[in-house]
Image: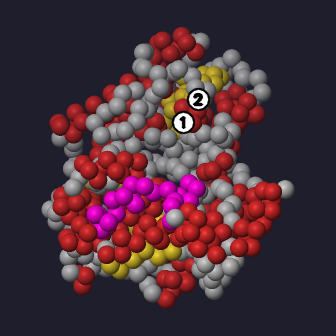
Amino acid sequence: MKGSLRRALKEVLGQVPLTAETYWWLRQRGAAVGKMRLPQVAAHLPQWAAQAQAAAAPAAQGQRVFLVAALRLWIAHTTLVALGLAGLGHRVTLGYLPYPDWWTRVSRFDLRRMNAYLARMLRPGEAAFTPLPLWPRPHAPALPSPLAQAVEEVTRFDVQYTQQVETPDPHSPLYRLRHSRNTATARALLALWQRQRPDVVIVPNGSILAFGAAYHTARYLDIPVVTYEFGEQRDRVWIAQNAQVMLQDTTALWQAVHQRPLSPSQWEQVKELFAARRGGRLWANFSRRWQDAPSQSGEQARRALGLDGRPLFLMATNVQGDSLVLGREVFTRSMAEWVRETVRYFARHPEVQLVVRIHPGEQRVKGTSLAEEVRHALPRLPEHIHLVPADAKVNTYDLIETAAAGLVFTTTVGLEMAMSGLPVVVAGKTHYRGRGFTLDPTTWDDYWQTLDALTRAPQRFRLSEQQIALAWKYAYHFFFDYPLPFPWHLHFMEEDVRRHPWPEVWNPTSPWAKTIACFVGAPLPWESPSREDVS
């Protein structure tokens, strides 16, 4: 009862102007509230802002940039990006939201306190950029129908991402919360950008949460928008201009480089990376291992799983709800449907064997495993179908070594299967689809016909030497050219700022400055007329 009364009182007091802010200042002495703590930014922002202001080029040379910030880590990171852009002479507005996470309903009283904390913490940055709270924003216009539909899609992605499911419940509390926040964000930005149009909008991710709402609002208003995200490499960033970066569209890059041969040093580099991925080792600036089990041999993997001499088809899944899966359907309604229908197909084809390798990343999420989808489709697995769960101490590359063909949705393992010479059937919209070394059905009928041909004679579809070389070339450019040089990784910010001093970042000839220029309209390296920066 006390908890209910407390929540009700907070909702009432949250409607009264300055009540929460006064309480926060008098009782909490301006301290961080709950999970909204940014000690690194609070400690270093005055010094960083002074350095940015001292280094800044004349404002007349800059563009009007609007950065969208939400959630603790991203607020810290966009603050660094704002300073980097300001130091290069741009006029930057950092619009921020006070929500501590994206799944918990928070009272207006607490949101006002968090807003007050963020305003105080970001105040030293005013020497370089303009901090602007995006909540609360009264009198915002209703969303036009196309933008409302886009917000609905973002909301569906949010629930899929949060719960690691593919069929979200539109009546669930989480769905209603995400729809309310996404709508409010889009309405606030629509009103702001209609009154004062920025030259460019910069948004992390661009596909989910407030970031997705901001991206679609900018696109609706035809404002240039840049999205960015981080992968597993230190000192590198993914950037997309007027597109969602999580779609990893490498079309322009591939058009620029696909006819160029790799140099001997480039071949050596990509071979070393592939060996590290196979062996479960860290390599160079990559910050994670790709396998939990060391590589042994294909023959040992066959013995461990009880496989015989029949041709082996390896089906490698993604994690449900992962950002790299959302909205990637080509002819299926979901990845789960693809899994169910595919194992049912192979149940009718005992002349071959199927191994379903569940993504090891499922161990780190709370959603339903795709192993359950396999069991739902086939409550009793026939002897020629083998399920390898996420926590199995099996190295996926050992399975590739002994397979006759591969089946994937969007996982990068499909690219590595092709690098090993396997015919790979790609069911989802992944970045390497349609690059000349995969089988890419566009309908269910096309998919079944492809599987029929493969099961009859898989050896006929083995990749040619030219196709294998093409896959290796693509892998090189995807891993080493698509991620651009960038000084601050989302998960290593404080350390990275120490590693890369501000004068180094702002040096006009530095790789960092060239990448930051891509945030405000400079061509990506592979779109430059000279294309000198592409390997």
Amino acid type, label 2: Ala
Residue 75 in the magenta stretch? The answer is no
Q: Is residue 289 above or below residue 25?
A: above
Relative to 493, is 97 on the left or the right? right
Please tell me which residue lies in front, 215 or 437. 215
Taking the spot 41% from the left edge, 32% from the top edge, the residue there is 289
In what element is the residue under mark 2? loop
Amino acid type, label 1: Gly
Q: Position of residue 281 (x, y in %)?
A: 36, 27
Q: Residues within 10 Å of mark 1 (few under 14, many from 20)?
A: some
Label annotation for residue 82: none
Which residue appears farthest toward the front when viewing the image?
26
Which residue appears farthest toward the bottom when viewing the image?
195
Residue 38 in the magenta stretch? The answer is yes
Look at mark 2 in the image and give the residue it sits on.
390
Q: Is residue 480 visible?
A: yes
Q: Residues within 10 Å of mark 2 (few under 14, many from 20)?
A: many
Q: Position of residue 447 (x, y in %)?
A: 60, 43
Taking the spot 45% from the left edge, 40% from the top edge, the residue there is 412
Q: Position of residue 273 (x, y in %)?
A: 31, 34
Look at mark 1 in the image and give the residue it sits on.
361
Please tell me which residue lies in front, 123 or 164. 123
Please tell me which residue lies in front, 116 or 209. 116
Q: Which residues are magenta?
A: 30-49
Q: Is residue 179 visible?
A: no
In what element is the residue under mark 1? helix
- Residue contact between numbered discs 2 and 1, judged by CB atoms under 8 Å: yes
